[in-house]
Amino acid sequence: MKKALLALVAVLVVAALAAGSWTAFAGEGDGKTARGTCADRSTELSVEQEDGGLEASFELQSVAPGETWDVVLKQGGTTLLEGQRQTDEDAELDLDAPADEDGSNEFTATATPADGGEPCTASVTR
């Protein structure tokens, strides 16, 4: 009887530890992500805790490397990042910018082809 009780307690302890580990490492935590498409491109805008602060990240998967884009990353009415960027050898455009934890919960990224094509926009609420 004592062996069965000890075995049951051991199984419960292992199960509790496994569940705690899964929660700590597998969850998104406080992060929010919005995925979308525009034309033949895909977008992803994420806002999450990173290295003790808040970070906004935007990724655009385009159709060709070396494309030039005019990009704007905003938190509410505050511009976090603005300028021209080129897609890398994998036709990706990646932007990261620190954000104000006490600022707006609304984030928007807009990438417009420099040649005047359709803009790609993504929004997420934290």
Image (spheres, rainbow, N blue to C red):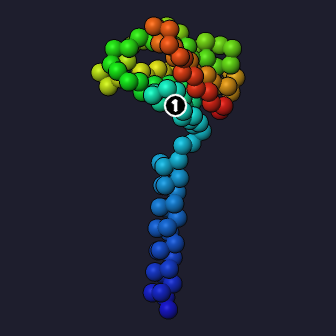
State the quadrant of the C terminus. Answer: top right
Tell how many labels: 1
Crowdedness of circle 1 by 10 Å Cα count: few (<14), some, many (20+)?
some
Q: Is residue 13 above or below residue 76?
A: below
Q: Residue at x 47, y 61 (%)?
A: 18
Q: Is residue 43 visible?
A: no
Q: Is residue 44 above or below residue 29?
A: above
* SS at badge 1: strand
x%, y% of residue 9? Answer: 51, 76
Q: Nearer the viewer, residue 24 or 67?
A: 67
Q: Nearer the viewer, residue 124 or 67?
A: 67
Image quadrant in which you'd find residue 67? top left
x%, y% of residue 72? Answer: 55, 13
| Outermost residue toward the bottom in this view | 1
Q: Nearer the viewer, residue 24 or 75?
A: 75
| Outermost residue toward the left in this view | 89
